[in-house]
C-alpha cells in the first residue's frame, strides 16, 4: 500500500509472489531485480524500499522528510 500511495502516478500494481526458496526476498520492477535481501544483508526499512523503487521509476521524485538523494551509478 505504501508504494501504491507514494508512487500513484508511476506504479499501477504490486504483485506478491511466494518463492520456492525459503528466505528469498527480492523486489523486481518490470522483470528486473532491483533489490535482493541476501545481497543487502537483511530486510530494508520502508524508506529504503521507497528510495530503491524511486531510483528506478522516477529518479527526480522527492520523497519528503525521509529522503536521501537518488543513488547514481557511475
Image: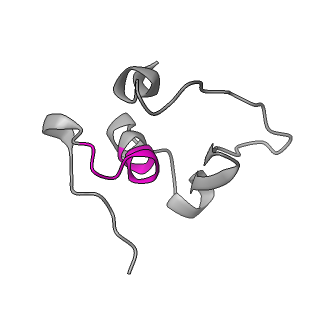
What segment carries the magenta color?
A: 51-61
At a point 32% along the width and 39% down the height, the residue shown is 47
Where residue 63 appears, x then y in whole percent? Answer: 24, 38
Where residue 38 appears, x then y in whole percent? Answer: 61, 58
How many discs mark residues in the rendered view? 0
Residue that extends furthest to the right in the rendered view of this protein: 20
Residue that extends furthest to the front in the rendered view of this protein: 9
- Residue nearer the viewer, 4 or 22: 4
Residue 55 among magenta residues: yes
- Specify whether 43 is left or right of 7: right
Q: Quadrant of residue 48?
A: top left
Residue that extends furthest to the bottom in the rendered view of this protein: 74
Q: Quadrant of residue 36?
A: bottom right
Residue 72 vertical placement versus 26 (above, below): below
- Specify whether 69 is left or right of 1: left
- Specify whether 58 is left or right of 65: right
Q: Quadrant of the C terminus?
A: bottom left
At a point 45% along the width and 46% down the height, the residue shown is 57
Principal secondary structure, stretch drawn in magenta: helix
- Specify whether 57 is left or right of 38: left
- Residue nearer the viewer, 53 or 57: 57
Amino acid at each position: 500500500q505504501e508504494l501504491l500511495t507514494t508512487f500513484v502516478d508511476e506504479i499501477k500494481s504490486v504483485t506478491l509472489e511466494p518463492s520456492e526458496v525459503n528466505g528469498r526476498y527480492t523486489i523486481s520492477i518490470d522483470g528486473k531485480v532491483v533489490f535482493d535481501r541476501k545481497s543487502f544483508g537483511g530486510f530494508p526499512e520502508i524508506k529504503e524500499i521507497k528510495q530503491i523503487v524511486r531510483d528506478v521509476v522516477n529518479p527526480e521524485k522527492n520523497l519528503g522528510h525521509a529522503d536521501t538523494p537518488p543513488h547514481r551509478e557511475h
